[in-house]
Image (tube, rainbow, N blue to C red):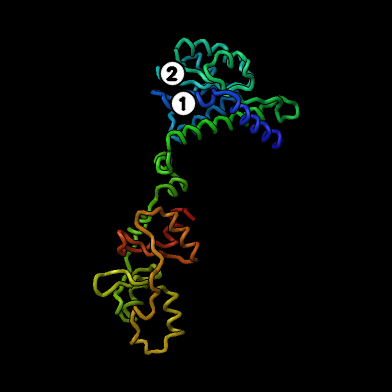
Amino acid sequence: MLLEEADAVRGVADAIALTPDFAQCVAAILSLQGRVVVTGIGKSAHIAGKMVATLNSTGTPALFMHAADAIHGDLGMIQPGDFVIAISKSGDTPEIKVLVPLLKRKGVPLAALVSNADSYLGVQADYVLHAPVTREACPHNLAPTTSTTAALALGDALAVCLLEARQFTTADFARLHPGGTLGKKLYLKVGDLSRQNQVPQVLEDAPLKDIILEISGKRLGATAVLAAEGQALLGIITDGDLRRMLTNFSSRLDEVRARDIMTPQPMTIDLEDFAVEALVRMQQRNITQLVVTENDRFSGFIHLHDLLREGLV
């Protein structure tokens, strides 16, 4: 079954290459002053609803209109400047045959997403988005399976072409998807999290007692080490550095200074970088915190727990 549907999708790709209608349809939608209205009945209506959702989420304003409801009042949602896409496998269903003349009367462009390009809908439409299907994957060749998969794939292709033509960016995508983990990956910045944390820091000549108190008190498992003059970032001291110091340092503990046990040139991340990038860097280095900078100056810390709390891990 899956192989049959995969073959049908390949057939759709071949059909697109045979006529200019797909490219012309993309160009027409790009020049719209209104919305794309997608209609269908039965299983095609479900595909139409999904196409509308994909268009809206990728920068093309769209509405769903059920073909049966259209002839009972919903036709009023279509306004001058809109563009209609009608989905029908056969292109000859009774509801579609009633609807098409009404659409023509409104003077809006009509694209037919059909399996049978020679159908009533295919002949009447201004553009034919051809999704040829010879047989359903259903063993009885009855339940819409291959045909809906082909229509779905063609709708996705249309949305992606429009996305690319509009130069729709990840930032644009984030503005339309602010909720959930996906949205957070696209808009949540390092600074949104690091500003909520305390800012552990010691000077390079700080004694061991001050280092321990700073790490324990600020509860991030580390402290930045700053130059005594100019406050430039010199290094980082973590809980692990303290444990290694107790094992390896041969001098008296009261002689230990921050510069003696710090890790110089720590990995940093900018305040304006995406939080998901902080996760990538932590995973690459197998660490649990990063020093945050702003304009190359020390700003604070972001911790793995911050990312866990936001559901990015």
The residue that label 1 is drawn on is: 27
- Residue at x-position 65% and y-position 30%: 11
The three-letter code of the residue at mark 2 reads Ile
User: Which secondary structure, mark 1?
Assistant: helix
Report whether 53 appears left or right of 229.
right
- Residue at x-position 54% and y-position 27%: 48
Circle on res. 78: 2
Image coords of residue 257 (percent x, y)? 33, 81
Classed neighbour count for the residue bearing mark 2: other residues with Cα under 10 Å, few (<14), some (14–19), many (≥20): many
Image coords of residue 249 (percent x, y)? 42, 86
- Of 238 and 18, which appears nearest the observer? 18
Residue 230 can be seen, yes or no: yes
Residue 95 can be seen, yes or no: no
Vertical position of residue 87 compared to residue 159: above or below: above
Image coords of residue 272 (percent x, y)? 35, 54
User: Which secondary structure, mark 2?
Assistant: loop
Q: How many marks?
A: 2
- Residue at x-position 40% and y-position 17%: 80
Vertical position of residue 18 compared to residue 186: above or below: above
Q: Residue furthest left?
A: 229
For marks 1 and 2, give the CA distance. Answer: 20 Å
Image coords of residue 112 (percent x, y)? 56, 20
- Residue at x-position 50% and y-position 62%: 284
Vertical position of residue 270 compared to residue 1: above or below: below
